[in-house]
Amino acid sequence: MIDSPRVCVQVQSVYIESQSTPDDERFVFAYTVTIRNLGRMPVQLLGRYWLITNGNGREIEVQGEGVVGEQPHIAPGEEFQYTSGAVIETPMGTMQGHYEMVDVDGNAFRVAVPVFRLAVPTFIH
């Protein structure tokens, strides 16, 4: 597998206060991912890998097929956007990972998702 500059990933996270219970060490976050195909050939997302780290350094690995029940095809110049969630035990943490993808010729490649923060807005670290 090779890394590919043809696909760009952007992530925005938000704290979901209404679903969180800080007294029970339950902090719920939603994150919206936008995956853009900057190349000239269609691509398909086949799988994902996430490393979720809470504020105490506890790590959870999540991997599986597709995202939100889909293995989307993304045409050149197009994007795919989805929203999902994560629950951690601290008011601050991080996520990072990658997507497993294939191009139209069946060549597999990996697209890195750089580290992004999960943080309660009023939390000062």
Image (tube, helix red, strand yellow):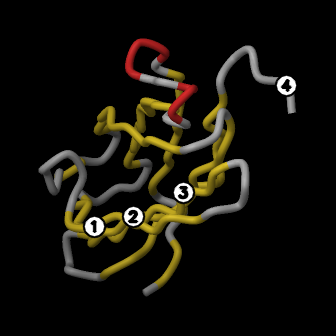
Report how far apart the C-alphas of labels 1 and 3 lie in the structure. 16 Å
Residue 79 percent coordinates (x, y): 32, 37
- Whichever of labels 4 and 1 marks the residue nearer the N terminus, that label is 1
Disc tally is 4
Residue 67 percent coordinates (x, y): 24, 51
Report how far apart the C-alphas of labels 4 and 1 lie in the structure. 34 Å
Q: Nearer the viewer, residue 108 or 55?
A: 55
Question: Which residue is under mark 3?
Answer: 52
Element carrying mark 3: strand
Q: In the rendered structure, which amino acid carries the disc numbered 3?
A: Ile
The residue at the point 62 percent across, 57 percent down is 53
The residue at the point 42 percent across, 38 percent down is 33
Badge 4 density bin: few <14, some 14–19, many ≥20, Cα 10 Å: few
The residue at the point 49 percent across, 46 percent down is 9
Q: Nearer the viewer, residue 71 or 16?
A: 16
Q: In the rendered structure, which amino acid carries the disc numbered 2?
A: Tyr
Label 1 close to label 2 by CB (< 8 Å) = yes
Report how far apart the C-alphas of labels 2 and 4 lie in the structure. 31 Å
Question: Which residue is under mark 2?
Answer: 99
Label 3 close to label 2 by CB (< 8 Å) = no
- Whichever of labels 1 and 3 marks the residue nearer the N terminus, that label is 1
Badge 1 density bin: few <14, some 14–19, many ≥20, Cα 10 Å: some
Report how far apart the C-alphas of labels 1 and 2 lie in the structure. 6 Å
- Whichever of labels 2 and 4 marks the residue nearer the N terminus, that label is 2
Q: In the rendered structure, which amino acid carries the disc numbered 4?
A: Ile
Question: Which residue is under mark 1?
Answer: 47
Question: Which residue is under mark 4?
Answer: 124
- Whichever of labels 3 and 2 marks the residue nearer the N terminus, that label is 3
Q: Is residue 7 left or right of residue 67?
A: right
